[in-house]
Image: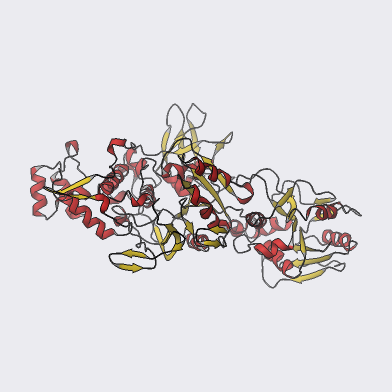
Amino acid sequence: MDLSIVIPFYNGDSPTLDKLLYNLNDLQLSVIVVDDLSERPYDGELHNAKLLNLNKKRYFSGAVNEGIKSCANDVLVLNQDVSFTPASTQWLDLLEQQRGKYAMIGESIKGEHPGWRHGYIRGTFMFMRRDAIDKVGLLDELHFPHWGSTCDWQCRIARKGFRALPLQNIPGWAHLASRGQSFGGSTTEYLRKNRAQFKKLILTPPIISVIIPSFNHGKYLESAVNSLIGGPTDLGDMPGQTFQGFEIIIIDDASTDLESRKIAASLADGWKGIKFIQRKTNGGTGTANNSGISIATGKFITIMCGDDMMESHRLERMLREIRQDETRVIYDDLQLFRHGERVDFEHNGQIFPSMKMKEYDFNKLLYKNHMHCGILFARSAWEIIGGYPEAARYGREDWAMNIALGINGYCGIHINEAMYLYRREDQNRTKTNTTLAWRKFFLTQMQQLFPRTYAKERAIMSCNGCGGRGKTPKKISAKALSSKALTEIQGVEGMILLEYVGKSIGTQTWYGPATGKQYRFGLSSHKIQPVDPDDIQTGSNRKPGFLEIRESGRRVFKIVKPKVSIPKASEVPHAAEKVAFSEGESIDVDNLDIEIDDFDAEQDAFRAATLVGQEINISPAAKKLAQKMDVTTNDIVIYVTGTGRDGKITVKDIREYANA
C-alpha cells in the first residue's frame, strides 16, 4: 500500500514512540515524525523513520500539515501515544479494503456531538486519501490549530463529494491515553502550563451557524447553499467559503409551494453540516430565525435569506472582525444581482457598484434601519435579548433585532466592502413593503416594541448610541427601572430578567458563577428575578451560567421576553393603500420605489405624507408651545410619544423633545 505515516510529536514518552516506530519498521512503510518544538525532544531510535523539527510552535494541525507536505501519497496520522498488536496487520488490511470507497477513515469521537450526529474522526488514527487532500487542502491550522481541525477537514471533504468512515474500534490498534483524560498526556501538560491558550486551541466546528429562512424560495436555495459550500449557483460555479467551520440551518416557514419544502428538505445532510427545520405554520422571518438559532451550535450567528448568496471570503472576513470584540455586531455592504449577473445600484440618477450601508449610528437606527439582515453576532447576544421579536412577522424583524442589540450594548461595526449578494428580482418583500403606509406601520411597531427607548429615555440604553468599538456601554442603577422596563432594556447594571422553569416548587438560593451574588428562585415564588449579565453565560462546565444550567437535559432558566401583540390583518397596510398628505390630493404609495439605504429621502417623503391632515392627540398648551419652539407636526408624529392621559401629548413632552 502506498502510504506514509505522520506522527506529530510534543514532549511525548520516548519509550512508547520507540516501540511504535519499531513495529512500523517491519511493515516497510514511510514514517515521518514531526517534532512540534518539544522541550523534551525524542531521544530514542528512529528505526528508519524521518524526523522533521519545526522551528516554531505549530500545534497538532501545523505539525500534521508539515508531514503531509513532505510526502506525495496517502497519509495515516497517528497519535504519539498509540500502539499496534505485534505482527498484526488488521488495521492496514482495513485501510486497503476501504480506501477506494472512503477518503477519510479513522477513530471516531466517543459519544455524540450536537453539531455532528454522525460523529467525526479524531487525530489519533486518521487516514487521509491524497486525492481528497489535493481537492480540499490541508488542515485549517489558522482557525483550528490543535483541536477540531479533523472535524473541519471531514466536513470539508463531504462538501466536495467525498465520504468518511468514523469507527469506534480499529482492529489491532490501541490508544494509550490515561483513563478519564479529555486529551492526550502532552496536550494536558501543555494546557496546564498555558491556560490562556485553552479557548484558542480547544475548538470544534461549527464556529458560525448560518441561518437560512425560506418561504417559497425553493428554486433559489441550492444557489444559496452552494455559495457557502461550493458548487453551481445562479452566478456560475462558486468555490464556497474560504472558512468552512460553519453549519447551515435551513428553516422552511410553512411554504405554500410544496416543491420549495421538498427542495429545502433534500438539501439537509448531516455529513455536510446542513440541518433542516419544517415549520407547520407560517410565523414570519423572525420566528423562523429563532427556530433555527434555537438548535444552532455555533458561537456566532449570521442570517442569509433563502434567495440570497455570499461572496466566498465573507464569513472569514466577518469572523476576523468579530473576534476582535465579541460584543459587536458586524455588517457589510450589499452587492446586488439579478437574473444571473451582478448589477449596479441605481439611485437618484446615479450609478454605484454596490449598495453602501451607513456607518453605525444608534440614534438614526431608531428611525431608519441601516444594517441589512445578514449581520454576524454572538449567539449569547441572542440569548440575552430574547431572540428576534416575533411580533414583527410582516417584515423589518432585522430592524427590530438591530435596535434590541443596540439597547443591550451590542453596537454595529461596518465593513466597507460588498460581500452579501442581494437578489433584486420580483420575489423580494422589500419591493412591496417599502411604501409610506408600510413605513409608518413599521415605525409604529418599533415604538410598540421599545416604548421607553422611543420616549427619549436614552439613559437606559446600554449602547447609548456608542457607534463604534472600544466604548463601554453605559449602565444605570436598576432601582430606577420598573420590571416592565427591565424586560425591554436588558443588560443594565446586572439586570437581566430570568424566569425559573425548573422543577423545584420551593424557593432555592442560587449563587452567581461569576459574581458570587445570591439569587432566590422558585416556581411558587420568586419565579422571575433580575440577574447580573456576568452570571448569565460563562462557557464553563465547572461553573455554568444560568442559561447553561440543565436538569435532565432541559434548561432551568430562560430570558423573559417583552410581550408585544402581533398585529391583526386589518391593521396591516393594504398593498394599494393611499396616504393623504394634503386636502384633495393623494399619493399612490405603490409607485414609490424607496431603497432601503436612502435614509434622508425616505424621511422627507414620510414627512410630506404625514405633515398635513394627521390627527394628533395634543393639548392646546402643548400645541402652542410646539409652534413657539418650532417643533413641526411631523416631529410630533414621528418623534414624540404622548405621556398624558390616553397618550395625549403634553407641554412636558414638547419641552423634553426640544431639549433632547
Q: Quadrant of the N terminus?
A: bottom right
- Left-right relation of 642 to 627: right
* Coordinates of residue 144 in the picture (x, y in percent): 62, 59
- Left-right relation of 136 to 413: right
Q: Quadrant of the C terminus?
A: bottom left
* Coordinates of residue 533 in the picture (x, y in percent): 44, 47
Q: Is residue 288 above or below residue 362?
A: above
Residue at image position (66%, 64%) is 137
Residue at image position (36%, 61%) is 357
* Coordinates of residue 404 in the picture (x, y in percent): 37, 48
Q: Nearer the viewer, residue 193 or 260?
A: 260
Q: Is residue 253 above or below residue 195?
A: above
Q: Nearer the viewer, residue 238 or 219?
A: 219
* Coordinates of residue 606 in the picture (x, y in percent): 22, 53
Quick check: can you spot residue 254?
yes
How many numbered discs?
0
- Left-right relation of 281 to 360: right
Q: Nearer the viewer, residue 383 or 275?
A: 275
**Residue farthest to the bottom?**
55
